[in-house]
Amino acid sequence: MALNVVIMAAGKGTRMKSAQPKVLHRLAGRSLLQHVLDCAAGLGAGRVVVVTGHGAATVEASVAGSGAVCVRQEPQLGTGHAVQQAVPALDAACDTTLILYGDVPLIRSETAAALVAACGGNALALLTVELADPSGYGRIVRAGDAVRAIVEHKDASADERAICEVYSGIMAAPTAALVRWVRALRNDNAQREFYLTDVVALAVAEGVPVVARSVADPMEVEGVNSPAQLADLERRLQRRHADALLEAGVRLADPARLDVRGTLVCGSDVEIDVNCIFDGEVTLADGARIGAHCVLRDAQIGADAVIHPFTHIEGATVGAGALVGPYARLRPGAELGPEVHVGNFVEVKNSRLAAGAKANHLAYLGDATVGERVNYGAGSITANYDGAHKHRTVIGDDAHIGSNCVLVAPVTVGAGATIGGGSTIARDAPAGALTLARARQVTIAGWQRPRKASKQG
């Protein structure tokens, strides 16, 4: 079925107490609006229209490249007024239009698809939820099973406020009828606004069926209006991630101290300690162990690898059985082979370390190719940048790089070579030989350290 999706994203979000538009605040690493755009993408919508208002330029810049069409609602005169602004941008060939909200981030594509199916291009379908405390929400007024009206909380009578079934704000409607209804909306209410909910009465008056579909999980339709609500939703969403991982057999030291801000795929017998953050696309193979306070972004961790605490990994691959950290940093393009050791305060960027290579302490490897079983000493670095261009260092199998060395790229260290500690190597070092590049030690007897001149009174 051809589908329009309208996403309401014009509100100021006063209670957020922020200069940033509300829909751009982040939940699980993505903006609230991006979550809703992802839902629309999952539906295969033919046209997505984002209604902007407060901070319009910033919101519109955030969706650039998504394929969505942006229209502005200025001034903001209610939800019905917002849809009125979207009408000219709708694709008339799409027989159904779905209304979503940029500050209701956790609606699932499956739930939205079921609502679209209930509409079927000829009924007004409303997504509802039962709440123990429905304060502030529009109440669903029924006559038997049929929906007769939605009454906003501020306009509801005492009997209507006792109703616990509420309207989530999300609806699917026949496109042609929706256009007709929103053009007929009036603002003769307490707030002098155009309510989208008034289309229910217009549908009933025309004899168009009005159906309701209830969502099982209220979290899917919860909106964000304050930092407290955002934080609460974040923790509940993360607990949902944690429960899914536990169900799959992952061992979490504390399910309450986990943050998944993307996609985390785990093999069997994976262990994750407390306060770890997983961002982007992360894969943990069988038996991988992640220590406390680690940050992994767009990373692949091999089987039985151990990531010790306080390690940061981004855009990197770690081979099977490797040991990384604590306090290590793997930057984009780092590739660690099987059984590689990268220890404390070692940084690796755009470099490949082959099987069994070790850089255990206080070292930097940038733009380097490191062979098998290489031992890379503490305090050693590859000087890969000449101020204008990056250059590569190649270290052959079984080479030994002493402590506190500088390898000035481009340079090659041959297989089995040894570089003496404290050397600065600016020319290729031959295989199987010891290469030194340091001044002879000299002692000057009686030398006096410079002194500051004494102050005169």
Image: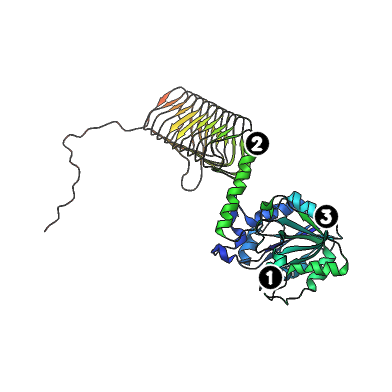
Residue with the mark numbered 2:
247
Q: How is the structure coloured here?
A: rainbow
Residue type marked 3: Ala
Which quadrant would the C terminus be assigned to in this image? bottom left
> Which circle's residue, 1 or 2, is located before the other in the chain?
1
Please indicate, yes or no, whether residue 115 appears anywhere in the rendered image. Answer: yes
Q: Secondary structure at mark 2?
A: helix
- Per the image, label 3 sits on a secondary structure element best described as helix
Residue 330 position within the rendered picture, expressed as x and y whole percent measured from the top left: 52, 39
- Report the residue that reaches farthest toward the front: 159
> Which residue does the numbered mark 1 point to in the structure image?
73
Q: Residues within 10 Å of mark 1 (few under 14, many from 20)?
A: many
In the image: residue 147, left or right of residue 379:
right
Q: Disc 3 designates what residue?
A: 118
Q: Is residue 390 above or below residue 341?
A: below
Of 205 and 330, nearer the camera is 205
Foreground of the two, 47 or 156: 156
Asked if the residue under mark 2 is in contact with the one under mark 1, i.e. CB atoms within 8 Å, the reply is no
Residue 180, placed above or below residue 293: below
How much space separates mark 3 and mark 1, taking CA atoms? 29 Å
> Where is the N terminus found, in terms of image quarters?
bottom right
Which SS class for mark 1? loop
Mark 3 crowd level (few <14, some 14–19, many ≥20, 10 Å Cα) = many
Is residue 281 something that shows in the picture?
no
- Which is nearer the eye, 54 or 180? 180
Residue 200: % across, % down: 80, 66
Mark 3 and mark 1 residues within 8 Å of each other at the beta carbon:
no
Compare residues 31 and 66 and report the one nearer the observer. Answer: 31
Nearer the camera: disc 1 or disc 2: 2
Residue kind at label 1, given as amino acid type: Gln
Residue depicted at x 56% and y 53%: 231
